[in-house]
Amino acid sequence: MERKRFLAVVMTVMMVISMIPSMVFAAASSGELGGKLKIKGLAAVGVVLSADYAKVTPEEVTDEDFTFSWSRQTGEKELTQVGTEKTYTITQDDLGCRLVLDLTPVDGSGLTGTLTAKTLEVAATEEEAKAVEQEAEDTQQTETADGTENAQLEETADGTEDAQLEETADNAEGSQDSENQDVDRTEDVQQNAGNEQEDGSQNTKGQPEETTEGTDDSQMKIYTEDQLQVDENGNVQTDGSEKDGQAAGEDDKDKKTYEATVTVEDSEDQICDFGTVKGDLEDVEAQYVQITNTGNESLNFQEISPEHFMAQDIIEPLSAGESVSVWIQPREGLEPGEYDDMITYRTEEGIEVSFEAKIAVEGEDDSSDDEDLKPSDEPSAEPTETPDDSEAPSAGDNADASLEAQSLDVNTGSLNFSDIEENYTQANETLSVTVTNTGDGTVTLKIPKSDYFEVMNEDGSEAVSGIQIAKGDSLMFMVQPKTGLTKGDYSDTLIFESEEDSEVAAQVTAEVSVKEAEQEQITAVQADPESFSYDDLKEGYDTPEATTITLTNTGNTTVSLMQPYAEYFDIGELSASVLEPGDSAAFTAVPVTGLKVGNYLDSIQIAQTSSEGQEDVLTTIKASATVSEVKKIYKLSVTPEELNFGKAKEGYSEAPEAQKVTVTNEGNTNVTLNAPSGKNFKIGKLSATELAPGESCTFKIRPKEGLKAGSYTESVVIDNEQQISAEVKVQFTVKATRKAKIADPADNKITGISSDGYTTQSKITFTAVGAGMDNESPGKGDVRYVPYNWKVINTNSWSSAPYTAAFGITKAGTYTLTVTFDRQKYNGSEWKNTGEQDTKQVNFSITQAQTVTATPTPQPNGASAKTAVKTGDTTNITPFVIILAIAAGCIVGVVVYKRRKK
């Protein structure tokens, strides 16, 4: 190739390269994130969710540009992270909740800002999820038809929910703010702001009308801190290259639900079972049930009064998610019987929760103590005492036998003993019975117990339960009447049974008769006590308590007693003078009044008159008394010695109830008491001031009214003229009361809004300050206000502190900033919304920013633009300029070369 042609080709290539659009060499996506992030996939259990960037700017962003955070929204604002991968598979735990996806650019991506998307509530199946989406779409379309909102539900190809609110200038006057909606604002709206209105009125360009909240919201842009572009003079840039602001919001709140559940402590069947109770019900302990508000609204419970049970009322409203424990107790005075009530708690909202309460009440056992065992005229066919198996081994010792068929048999059905004479010392006859195991396995034998007969082993030793008899084996037992049986006929059924199964038994009937024995006549009387004494009498004594002497005929003949007498004792009349064998009579004896100092002894004879008229002494009772000089003793005692009036809160309106104190003269001399007094306690009047030995008086004590917080302890002294005293310690505590801190809604305020106004290029920043937000150590009942949302044209919410926001408005006018504060109350563990709100407003004005216009310089081609049109391409064009210059230089070089050559 010739040199000239080669050089021409090189220059042509370089010029073509310099003219290639810079977009061919543009770098990867970078800049501020914008647009709308969507979530691919239905909101149903088991579905895999992923991010959809179809409407995200800048374009061509991919999963590699972000870090992922999937969260479950369990309340109005509570989020729990459930995944950090690019995709997330919905689980059963997500049912009924919304899922939130947050995307954050990775380091070095060149992207700034964040993106967030949220699903509808998770359904159990994909069919249910589609129905929920359809319902949401119908709701949006209905609201549009009413003129309140112009919402368009955009669904992606796989059914992902993507709702946007597009408000136009035509319906701005009736628009309402809605949570979690994107407002599209285009440059066309701004350019047409000065055009003619629909009603024909003119609005000259450059002369904006002053508007209020009804202004078309396309005139306002809401910026986040990182989205605001502020120049060096502090003005917000509002040229056409800016991205439209997006109004932040929240999803529609859940519908109000009223639900509750009840749980009985320690009961899977939800039954308060008080079991079986005898007698007084005061000792029956209360049981507790827990009622939980499972809805999202507070519940107000009505009073309750079951028929047979007392139940605690729920007085305070029960907030959503909270639980309360209430007691249940049987009513006092229930008659014997069984009671089974269904107890129902009802709310003013129409909710009912129920549980069962039951109790069995038995009457008091009025049977008297068993009398001494006596034979009946006719023998009983049933045993009178249940066999005692306290020493028997447990059935588990012979568990294998209980699994096999058991059977017992005896060699005889009756044991008939010969008659014996009363007062025998030992039975004269012993009979045997053989017990045989006729079953399939070993039997553990229980020995019968009898009141009349003894069961012994073959060798004469005592037979005890727990003996094991192998299959087919037999054991012989010896039976004889017990010693000491009185006259009468005795019969008892002796049951030999299996410890493993009480129905496996063999029985034999034992019978014996005790006949009356011929006796010699015995005359005898026993005195109880046989002697008594009074050794502690003091001179001038009062008549002491008399001693009772019981006389019992221990012989076998009838006796006729004479009235006894004594010299130093007063003898009471005999309660009976004729005593049959075994009968008793009684009389009293007490020292006569007025005995002087000394020792006194008497022999009180108990006698009868014989058939010959002689006096026969049957027994003699020794009686003595000692009278000594009196030494004066002064002694006082109080009951109780300590009184505790408990605790009361400062400012109590009524002092605790007075308590009684008893003062007793424990000396032997009369005393005269002085009235006691107290400093912080009121002392009542003594019921008596003169006390004889052994006498008592009373008075009352109670704390004074109006005592300040503190602990009060005193000793109240009761003294007398004899210089002896007694004291009672009293105690009372007054607790300081804490007053709840109730924030005043008047202290809610908005700061940062300038009274000088702003321009259409101003960045407007403000802060909402809730009353009581500085309460760092709250107590139960404290109240505060927390900023919830704010509104100029659109409503924007805060989820947490700091409660600061920034925005800009591109149309002049007068506007109102409104901030809503939630009223919260501290329940002892956390702050809870009460449902009440307070609002604060501040007005501000926006003026049109001055536009700087430069004087154009005439150009040869007639262009009047000061600068070239911006294309949005930020590629560095310096290398292309250099290439172009080199190409131009080459052309000039070729031209010069040709001229010189010519």
Image: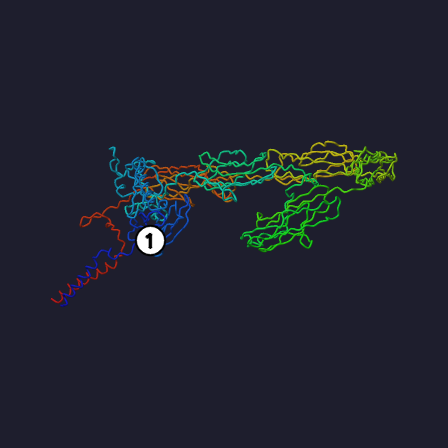
> Residue 421 placed where, x, y %?
74, 44
The tally of labels here is: 1
- Quadrant housing the C terminus: bottom left
Nearer to us in this view, 817 or 680? 680
> Residue 648 placed where, x, y %?
60, 38
Q: Is residue 303 above or below residue 408?
A: above
Residue 352 left/right relative to 220: right
Q: Residue at label 1? A: 111
Neighbour tally class for label 1: few under 14, some 14-19, many 20 plus, Cα within 10 Å: some
Nearer to us in this view, 711 or 748? 711
Quadrant of the image occupied by residue 277: top right
Quadrant of the image occupied by residue 198: top left
> Residue 318 placed where, x, y %?
48, 38
Instruction: Report whether residue 65 is seen.
Output: yes
Quadrant of the image occupied by residue 560: top right
Q: Is residue 32 above or below residue 255?
A: below
Residue flagged by tag 1: what amino acid is it? Answer: Leu
Residue 596 left/right relative to 492: right
Residue 850 left/right relative to 662: left
Instruction: Report whether residue 770 is seen.
Output: no
- Quadrant housing the N terminus: bottom left
